[in-house]
Image (cartoon, rainbow, N blue to C red):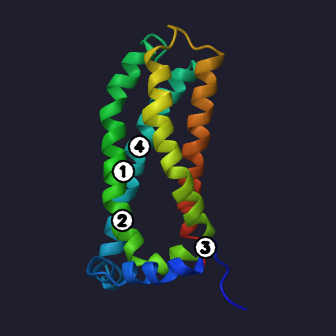
Amino acid sequence: MGRQQFAPEAWLPFFERLENTGLGIVVRESIWAFPIIEAVHLLGLGLLGGALLLVDLRLWGTGLTRQPIAAVVRHGHPWLVAGVVLMFLTGIPLFLSEAVKCYYNTSFWVKMITLPIALGYTFGARRWVAAVAPPHADWRTRLVAAASLGLWFTVAAAGRWIGFSA
């Protein structure tokens, strides 16, 4: 019985080539590269998650309630961007080191499908709603916060599950 796959079979050679890039080989064969890059990836997750929670909890109506929503978004934005950049810079070499494993991993595909949706939502709809939000949270801001938290929880959970999947 073969491995279960989520992606088209025609993509497998591309993933094999990615895994055999110089960077993929170095990260895979090094004793320390993968765990160090993974640790920095988790620091990026902390930045991203902290900035998201800061804004989403404010949109929900809890935390920093004396601050206008737009101000919380403005102050959290650089940390959000830093977290996203750090996660991309570290996520790519982590992926390259095990691209074929990712190809066969449903959690990887869930993450890759949800990630651009979450990014678009965060930097588009959520940011726009936060900019025109009323002084106090209402059902609209709570809905935006819930959707944001749901999207990012899916990205994070799927990403974490990649490590537990065969």
Residue indicated by mark 2: 92
Q: Quadrant of the N terminus?
A: bottom right
Helix or strand or loop: what does disc 1 sit on? helix
Quarter-wise, where is residue 92 in the image?
A: bottom left
Residue indicated by mark 3: 165
Q: Earlier in the sequence, mark 4 or mark 2?
A: 4
Q: Residue furthest right?
A: 1
Residue indicated by mark 1: 44
Badge 2: residue crowd in 10 Å (few <14, some 14–19, many ≥20)? some
Residue found 64% across the figure and 26% down from its top: 143
Report x, y in % for residue 162. Answer: 55, 67
Badge 1: residue crowd in 10 Å (few <14, some 14–19, many ≥20)? many
Residue indicated by mark 4: 48
Q: CA distance from mark 3 to mark 4?
A: 24 Å
Q: Quadrant of the C terminus?
A: bottom right
Amino acid type assigned to the residue bearing label 1 in the image: Gly
Q: CA distance from mark 2 to mark 1?
A: 13 Å
Which of the two residues, 55 or 99, is positioned nearer the viewer here?
99
Q: Earlier in the sequence, mark 2 or mark 1?
A: 1
Amino acid type assigned to the residue bearing label 3 in the image: Ser
Q: Nearer the viewer, mark 3 or mark 2?
A: 2
Asked if the residue under mark 4 is in contact with the one under mark 3, i.e. CB atoms within 8 Å, the reply is: no
Residue found 45% across the figure and 17% down from its top: 69
Asked if the residue under mark 4 is in contact with the one under mark 1, i.e. CB atoms within 8 Å, the reply is: yes
